[in-house]
Image: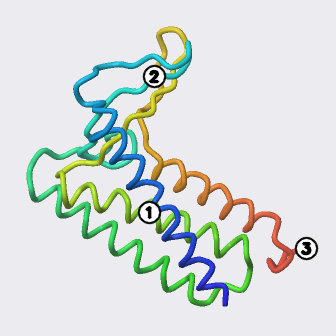
């Protein structure tokens, strides 16, 4: 039963990510607007990320692009295998969030050659990395996984 809940989480995250990217790119036309200031600490800006988190392992060639797609698919396969054995709601949803976010970014990498990022927080002249909805859910899912592994009653504590 828990793997079904995880699958629903995957679907919800993927749909939210695709809808946000469609709206920001095609309807709002963010790629043509430059920087749009929403709050003094928050902007919308279009960035095509050819790497992984924070542009790490950025590659402008097709080999790097497809290597990242394959690496992401391997990680997703491992997470799906883990999801099939989960028996906790929090863990199931957390893994589903990470998988759904990964699928959203994989879709971008396959379709566009890079991941569409557009949320930018900053404080004065210090700017945090630009990210998207998929990245947000990957982060939330990872935090929940850490929380679950730290505070779960099922973990055996050594004395």
Residue visible at 55% across and 83% down?
Answer: 82
- Looking at the image, residue 10 sits to the left or right of residue 75; the answer is right
Above or below, 114 relative to 67: above
Residue visible at 25% across and 60% down?
Answer: 68
Residue visible at 39% across and 19% down?
Answer: 36
- Looking at the image, residue 63 sits to the left or right of residue 75; the answer is left
Identify the disc placed on residue 159: 3
Give whichever of 44, 50 is nearer the camera.
44
Q: CA distance from mark 2 to mark 1?
A: 23 Å
Tell which circle, 2 or 3, labels the residue nearer the N-terminal end.
2
Identify the disc placed on residue 55: none
Above or below, 15 relative to 80: above
Residue 145 lies in quadrant: bottom right
Disc 3 secondary structure class: loop
Disc 2 secondary structure class: strand
- Looking at the image, residue 90 sits to the left or right of residue 66; the answer is right
Give whichever of 135, 33 is nearer the camera.
33
Identify the disc placed on residue 43: 2
Q: Which residue is mark 1?
A: 14
Q: Residue furthest right?
A: 159
Q: Nearer the viewer, mark 1 or mark 3?
A: 1
Q: x, y percentage for residue 8?
A: 56, 75
Question: Dot 3 surroundings within 10 Å: few (below 14), some, or many (20 or more)?
Answer: few
Instruction: Check the picture and name the quadrant holding the C terminus.
Output: bottom right
Q: Nearer the viewer, mark 2 or mark 3?
A: 2
Q: x, y percentage for residue 100?
A: 47, 66
Disc 1 secondary structure class: helix
Give whichever of 52, 40 is nearer the camera.
40
Q: x, y percentage for residue 83?
A: 57, 82
Instruction: Check the picture and name the quadrant holding the N terminus.
Output: bottom right
């Amino acid at each position: 039963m828990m793997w079904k809940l995880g699958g629903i989480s995957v679907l919800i995250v993927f749909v939210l990510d695709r809808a946000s990217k469609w709206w920001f790119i095609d309807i709002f036309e963010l790629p043509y607007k430059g920087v749009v200031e929403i709050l003094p600490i928050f902007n919308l800006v279009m960035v095509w990320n050819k790497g992984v988190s924070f542009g790490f392992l950025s590659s402008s060639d097709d080999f790097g692009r497809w290597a990242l797609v394959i690496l992401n698919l391997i990680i997703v396969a491992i997470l799906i295998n883990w999801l099939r054995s989960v028996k906790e709601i929090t863990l199931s949803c957390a893994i589903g969030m990470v998988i759904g976010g990964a699928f959203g970014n994989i879709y971008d990498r396959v379709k566009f050659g890079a991941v569409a990022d557009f949320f930018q927080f900053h404080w004065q002249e210090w700017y945090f990395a630009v990210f998207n909805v998929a990245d947000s859910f990957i982060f939330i899912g990872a935090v929940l996984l850490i929380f679950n592994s730290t505070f779960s009653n099922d973990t055996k504590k050594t004395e």
